[in-house]
Image: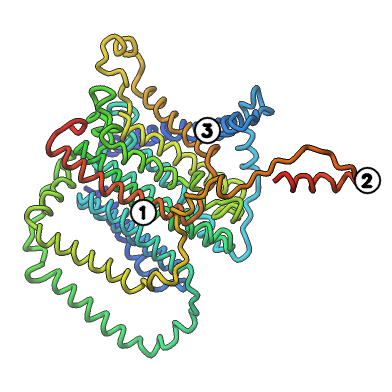
Amino acid sequence: MSDIDLVEWGITLFWILAKIVMIILPLVLAVAYATYAERKLIGYMQMRVGPNRVGPKGWLQPIADTVKLIMKEIVLPQGASKVLFIIAPILFIGPSFAAWAVVPFDAGLVLADINLGLLYILAMTSIGVYGVIIAGWASNSKYAFLGAMRSAAQIVSYELAMGFALVGVLMCAQSTNLGDIVMAQSGGIHQWYWIPLFPLLVVYWISGVAETNRAPFDMAEGESEIVAGFHVEYGGMAFSLFFLAEYANMILVSFLTAIMFFGGWLSPFEGMGVLDEITSWIPGTLWLLIKASVFLFMLFWLRATFPRFRYDQIMRLGWKIFIPVTLVWLPVVAIGIKLGFWPFT
Amino acid sequence: MTFQLIVFYSFAAWLIFSALMVITSKNSVKAALFLVLTFASAAAIWLLLEAEFLALSLIVVYVGAVMVLLLFVVMMLDIDYAALRQGFVNKLPIAIVTSLAFFGLLYYFITHGEFGPQNYANPAPKGADYSNIKELGRILYTDYFIAFETAAVILLVAIIAAIALTFRGRKHRKAQVISKQLEANKKNRLKIVSMEASIEETENSGEQEPSTAEEKS
């Protein structure tokens, strides 16, 4: 390898690292303030005010929480499998950050523009479950183990429905590249996939809530039954890694729903004459952020509204309702595309 | 090219190391986790072969689903590891002979004869916009249609057989009837009795509150 090659290689590596930092830093900040937003929102929904002590209107609460979590000691339970206990949170947070590599923020504004973006996302979310399972097993605790078992069964069940929903998207877009999927939806709000794929949108969204272990699907945590589930033995920084990954996953699911069913960075006023001209100065990234924020808000709203499901209800919903719905809708989509009638054109 | 070689050898080394750990580690859960690592490194090597669809589906299917279910079972097993290792020395010679013979056969077939590398030229690398998934779908549903559908039918038979073997009939099941649960509403569960509001005059006011609360409910 010559010197010039090495220099070029170094520059490429530097640029990739810089791009990763440009995605991860805002993401971590977004996670910190998503916790604040959630506590405030749920507070107002329950006629409370939420955190309001640290800083003006409680704006510095997430910072105070972070400092507290960093200062705390990490306790290793007796009889725990040491290496696995430490690896588990890393295995949980790694894939949830890695999945962001293929998320397009605007036309061409993506870290890794790969052909199989959709499948890559599915692969990353399915690796994430090992963090939960290993954490539950390595803790050497009954509650943690029960949480891990519940989570394993739940994620395997919902991944099927989620995968089928994604198949519908790739059939319509004729591509698994997330950027191409967004571009295939261009032409106005009626071209977005939420109309032809509405049942799949519902299935994907609810499976996404279930995959991120959020209420009302938070069986893996289940505070009222198994204390805190798989991360009951974790404290301090190790716990905050689980927390960080869960919120990063929530934001990811919101972004993916916006990208695959609501036209990603495309403006909703596309092709509407005057409205389109007035709003043309708004950058695509902002549209994507607005759309994703709506879904993030819905996640908080769900948590404030619904009580936790019973376990058999979760399994019934996944296997007996979602999978048949997707299996029925996929042939409909296929026929629609083949015969070319609205809204599949 | 050198960078690809470095990646290949590091993942190949990981693959062999983790495959060895699968059969040598004492704890079956750890063995299963090493098997996951083996699959992951195999997927990375497939990526180098430009088989990105196969690599990612290996991760989605084997790492994401099959191994999770295997771990599910293995974690709940109570295995006596000492008993498992009994007779290890006695059977060692046979094991060595069989594995050496198997290795020799594989080595012969891969390096000589029909399947040898001299019979297959290196395929030309495809461009970045080449879609693996479309090509695979086209070939599976046209040229290899019968083989593909036969495999699907065999899998279906296996699914039905697995259910038939474990299904013990409806008789002893205590499943909830969801439709009956949904039928329950305020009318047939709650009885609201209207009572006149009155304050009982008792000496001990502390016990009074819970008793009125009960009446109201």
Residue beneath disc 2? B203
Report the front residue among B199 and A132.
B199
Q: Residue at x 14, y 34 (%)?
A: A340
Point out which mark residue A223 bears: none
| Chain under numbered label 2 | B
Callout in the foreground (3, 2): 2
Q: How is the image coloured?
A: rainbow
Q: Is residue A264 depicted above or below A223 in this figure? A: above
Answer whether residue B43 is visible to the viewer in this image: yes
Q: Which residue is mark 1?
A: A320
Residue A100 position by quadrant: top left
* Residue B146 quadrant: bottom left
* Residue pictured at 38% horizontal, 90% vertical: B90
* Secondary structure state at the residue bearing disc 1: helix
Q: What chain is tagged by disc 1?
A: A
Q: Earlier in the sequence, mark 1 or mark 3?
A: 3
